[in-house]
Image (cartoon, grey):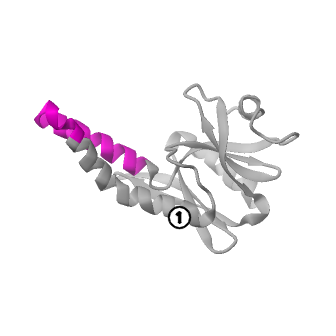
Amino acid sequence: MNLQKMQAKCAAVLGPGETLVAATKAMPRGAAHEVILGAAGGVAAAGVSPGLSGAGMIAGQKAGAGVGDEGRAERDAAGVDVGNATQVLLGVTDRRLVMIKLSALGKAKEILAAVDRSEITGVAMGETKLFGQTMAELVLKLSGEAEVGFGIAKVHRKDGDAVLAALSH
């Protein structure tokens, strides 16, 4: 990721003088499961009968809701509410970690959540599975024993490693 270009795209939502030192696109834990299962349910039902696509979508959403609810509960406990975002920009600045909603063209729309860097007590890169595919997962430990995870697609792994390094200092 070109950090200078991303800084320009995020300047309007960051604080005065705040500069990105690392950033990566990431998926909040559980968010992708919920969306993919909902869509898959609709497609599967439509294959049986076009009139069933709505019912299939609902069934798929219910199937993915458990994982989505767990991820939301985890983020709520950590005070990191990103709403229903399935992808955010995790940006590390000199002051905080910000979770930014991006437009389809990659422009920063708004900061969904932020954590002061002093509140981050630990950070690690682990692995998670998204429908059988292994991917990196950045796990943050926050004061108060709260934990929050973000999946990092293989294409963004180098940027995820840069975020890990920036938060480890």
Give the crowd class for mark 1: few <14, some 14-19, many >=20 residues within 10 Å: some
Instruction: Please report the residue visible at 63 percent of the width from the left and 74 percent of the height from the top.
Output: 145
Residue positioned most to the top: 105
Element on which disc 1 rests: helix
Residue 142 falls in image quadrant: bottom right
Q: Position of residue 59 (x, y in %)?
A: 24, 49
Residue at (29, 55) in percent of width and height: 63
How many circles with numbers are drawn on the protein? 1
Residue numbers of the magenta segment: 32-54
Left or right relative to 27: residue 62: left
Residue for badge 1: 74
**Residue 138, above or below 27:** below
Q: How far across and how far down the image is residue 168, in percent?
A: 74, 60
Type of residue at label 1? Glu
* 9 over 124 or under it: above or below: above
Q: Position of residue 19 (x, y in %)?
A: 82, 41
Tell whether position 30 is magenta: no
Quadrant where the C terminus lies?
A: bottom right
Q: Quadrant of residue 65?
A: bottom left
Of residues 41 and 76, the one nearer the viewer is 76
User: Residue 117: x, y in percent?
Assistant: 77, 59
* Quadrant of residue 44 within the rendered picture: top left
Q: Is residue 86 visible?
A: yes
Q: Residue furthest bottom?
A: 145
Q: Is residue 1 left or right of residue 75?
A: right
- Asked if residue 45 is among those painted magenta in the image, a careful observer would answer yes
**Is residue 82 toward the left or the right of residue 17 in the image?**
left
- Residue 169 in sight in this render: no
